[in-house]
Amino acid sequence: MMPHSIQTFGDSAEIKTQMSAYKVAWDNLNLGSQSEFYEKTIPKEKVDFTETFATTQLGSLFTSDKVVTEMRGPYNCNMLYRQTKVMPDVVVYNDDHYVALHPLGEPGRDLGSHGSRASHLMVVPWEDGAITLNEMFPSTEAEVNDLDARNAFLEDAYAALRNNCPVSECGSKVVARAAAMGIKVSLPIRDFMVDQIASFTPEFRAATPGYVLKNAADEDIAHDKGLIQMTIDALFTDPTLTIVKCIQGPENISQLMSHIHGFLLPKDRIPQGIADNYICSESILIQKQVIVADSMNDGCELVRTDSIAAPLVRQMAVH
């Protein structure tokens, strides 16, 4: 059984231990690199994935009931990958490789009764390149560099929302989405984020995956454009909040494509639901950069990246 520890979030020793165990399990399956496996195995079409999941023995790595029950139908464990090939429903920022989107379903659910739910963003790739199933598995140098770039990209996305940049400065996909909605590219990005959420019909919000946006009082405000605007403006202009970047480990995940989550949270405070269900992607990056450096010292083909001396992640309390 793969390791699982409550409050793994930023614990470098615990992350290193779990990564070592996952490396053994991954190597035993002879799957090649994560990017190679993804290119050869993961379908772009809406097809049942049950047989492939079984024959590749991915169940020995992904142990969550969520992923095991999502093999069939159009909304399955590869849906997020398919969504990277189309326009997101709420897109807020992109560059040539990555896109930041506000998720469907119930964004920020694992925060619990918390006012920062609307700040939930996800980073996914939208152009070909390195692609991984989960950052706890072994990575090539290119995949480590890709994780570094995605962490940095998330900072850029939040900066655009904090500064309320016009749509025209937030990337080609954002501009294209605005054009499709008949919205001027001079509109500030927070207003455009609100417009996209407010465009959801009651039928869309009630369907699968649907959309529910709760405030700190656990009230769904997804139907009220004014409340959505007030909530988003307050969150993205609050100087007391900091960006927390994280992933879900293989024991928690329901999608077979790595995606970084971002939340705006009070400095040095991690809600219990995040500590229990997520792992700090900055801490993972540091561990992977150490592996790259060690490989270089051992005379392997991997070489040191410029970011190996990344600053240590802040120690955050759990609340």
Image (cartoon, helix red, strand yellow):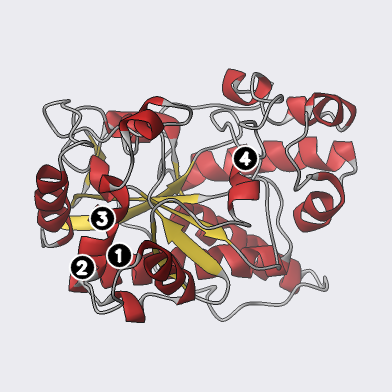
Identify the element where label 1 is drawn: helix
In this rendered view, identify the residue nearer to me: 294 or 168.
168
Q: Position of residue 293 (x, y in %)?
A: 65, 70
* Figure check: 9 above or below 96: above
Residue drawn at the location 69% of the way across and 21% of the way down: 1
The residue beneath circle 4 is 79
Q: CA separation, marks 4 and 2?
A: 30 Å
**What amino acid is labelled 4 in the image?**
Met
Residue drawn at the location 79% of the way across and 24% of the way down: 50
In this rendering, position of residue 110 left or right of residue 53: left
Figure quadrant of the C terminus: top left
**What amino acid is labelled 1 in the image?**
Tyr
Q: CA separation, marks 1 and 3?
A: 18 Å
* Figure check: 254 above or below 270: above
In this rendering, position of residue 225 left or right of residue 78: left
Q: CA separation, marks 3 and 2?
A: 17 Å
Closer to us: mark 4 or mark 1?
Answer: 4
In this rendering, position of residue 207 left or right of residue 27: left
Q: Which mark is residue 195?
A: 3
**Quarter of image, res 49:** top right
Q: Which of marks 4 and 2 is nearer the N terminus?
A: 4
**What amino acid is labelled 3 in the image?**
Asp
Q: Label 4 crowding class (10 Å Cα cut-off): few <14, some 14-19, many 20+?
A: many
Identify the element where label 2 is drawn: helix
The residue beneath circle 2 is 162
